[in-house]
Image (tube, rainbow, N blue to C red):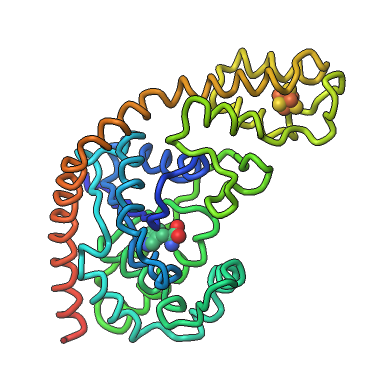
């Protein structure tokens, strides 16, 4: 049976938080562990440049931190091809060719472009590279002839553009590329400790690397049901972020108990959070052990990446031969 190709990437934001883990990475790991799929996961460091061109000093370190978290949570280089975008120069070549056939209007109407530009209003993002972000992303995806791309909803416009660009290439030159499908999965709604979306820039994140007192104090600071001000107030677990975390980290019997007790003010938020902190701690212990291992074996991390780069590079070279032949260049 021919396996379906799966491809996804992350910009190198450094250490991952629990939102990244439950939102994307866990999904990647599940796909990797399914025999029907052949998975490619990469660090989109050129994409980081589109918004961080002015501040590139941390990118390398961020790559290391991020891949250590990938490996520590179970992304397995023996099962998935794991590589760095900038190590495969073919991405730049395909990006260039795709940029020739991508109408500007497709890029200008991209909702993610408008949103990101508004969100990052503190920098000048009126650049060619930033507008072309989804063209580079398209190159990443079709280079490996991916059939499925696991992404969050925010990335759907980019996958739609990729599909349009791939169709246009196939129509103009030759049927080289399969049309990729987005793979959306249900992700639990986990907010940051201040109740907003968990995001590095909001400084409200719980990191995969957080442990001990750091973890306890972050969990202790989490917003709860806003109407539960006193210990004697009844709570509404359905409106409490701490409870959303319990649903992931605690066994179902305990989740039921907390729900019942919260609703009749039988448990206080301080105790509820203490229990959560120790549940997260328990679950993360093996992850932390692996993080420690890789931190002290950085050479091994480099070797794994070099191996992945080699595998990805071989495929990219083959695709580019087909592309050049199709374009007649
Ligand atoms: N744009 C994606 C993000 O911000 C990262 C990315 C770059 C990507 N290239 C990709 C995701 C290719 C999937 C496929 O999350
Ligand atoms: Fe949330 Fe737990 Fe407090 Fe209930 S007891 S409001 S679930 S923190």
Q: In this view, does 248 lie to the left or right of 1?
A: right
Q: Where is residue 1 in the image (x, y as percent from the top left)?
A: 21, 44
For the residue pair 252 and 122, the one nearer the viewer reads as 122
In this view, 328 is above or below 69: below
For the residue pair 97 and 284, the one nearer the viewer reads as 284
Q: In this view, does 244 lie to the left or right of 133?
A: right
Q: Give the quarter of the figure containing the C terminus.
A: bottom left
Q: Where is residue 80 in the image (x, y as percent from the top left)?
A: 25, 44
In this view, 165 is above or below 144: below
In this view, 269 is above or below 301: above
Q: Position of residue 83 (x, y in %)?
A: 24, 54
Can residue 163 be seen here? The reply is no
Can residue 15 be seen here? The reply is yes
Picture quadrant of residue 297: top left
Picture quadrant of residue 230: top right
Q: Where is residue 19 in the image (x, y as percent from the top left)?
A: 52, 43
For the residue pair 82 and 297, the one nearer the viewer reads as 297
């Amino acid at each position: 049976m021919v396996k379906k190709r799966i491809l996804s990437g992350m910009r190198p934001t450094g250490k991952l938080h629990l939102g990244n883990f439950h939102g994307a990475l866990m999904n990647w790991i599940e796909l990797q562990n399914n025999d029907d799929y052949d998975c490619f996961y990469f660090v989109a460091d050129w994409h980081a440049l589109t918004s961080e061109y002015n501040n590139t000093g941390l990118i390398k370190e961020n790559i290391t931190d991020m891949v250590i978290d990938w490996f520590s949570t179970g992304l397995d280089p023996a099962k998935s091809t794991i590589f760095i975008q900038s190590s495969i120069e073919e991405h730049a070549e395909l990006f260039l060719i795709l940029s020739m056939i991508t109408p500007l209007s497709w890029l200008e109407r991209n909702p993610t472009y408008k949103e990101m530009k508004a969100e990052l209003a503190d920098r000048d993002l009126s650049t060619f590279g930033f507008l072309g972000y989804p063209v580079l992303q398209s190159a990443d995806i079709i280079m490996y002839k991916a059939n499925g791309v696991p992404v969050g909803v925010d990335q759907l416009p980019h996958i739609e553009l990729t599909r349009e660009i791939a169709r246009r290439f196939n129509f103009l030159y030759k049927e080289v590329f399969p049309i990729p499908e987005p793979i959306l999965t249900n992700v639990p709604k986990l907010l940051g400790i201040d109740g907003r979306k968990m995001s590095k820039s909001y400084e409200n994140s719980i990191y995969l690397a957080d442990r001990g007192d750091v973890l306890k104090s972050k969990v202790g600071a989490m917003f709860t049901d806003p109407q539960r001000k006193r210990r004697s107030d009844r709570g509404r677990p359905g409106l409490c972020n701490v409870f959303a975390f319990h649903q992931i980290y605690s066994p179902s019997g305990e989740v039921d108990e907390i729900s019942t007790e919260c609703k009749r003010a039988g448990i206080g938020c301080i105790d509820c959070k203490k229990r959560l902190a120790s549940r997260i701690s328990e679950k993360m212990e093996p992850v932390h052990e692996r993080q420690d291992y890789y931190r002290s074996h950085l050479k091994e991390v480099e070797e794994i990446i070099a191996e992945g780069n080699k595998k990805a590079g071989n495929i990219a070279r083959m695709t580019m031969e087909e592309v050049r032949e199709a374009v007649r260049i």
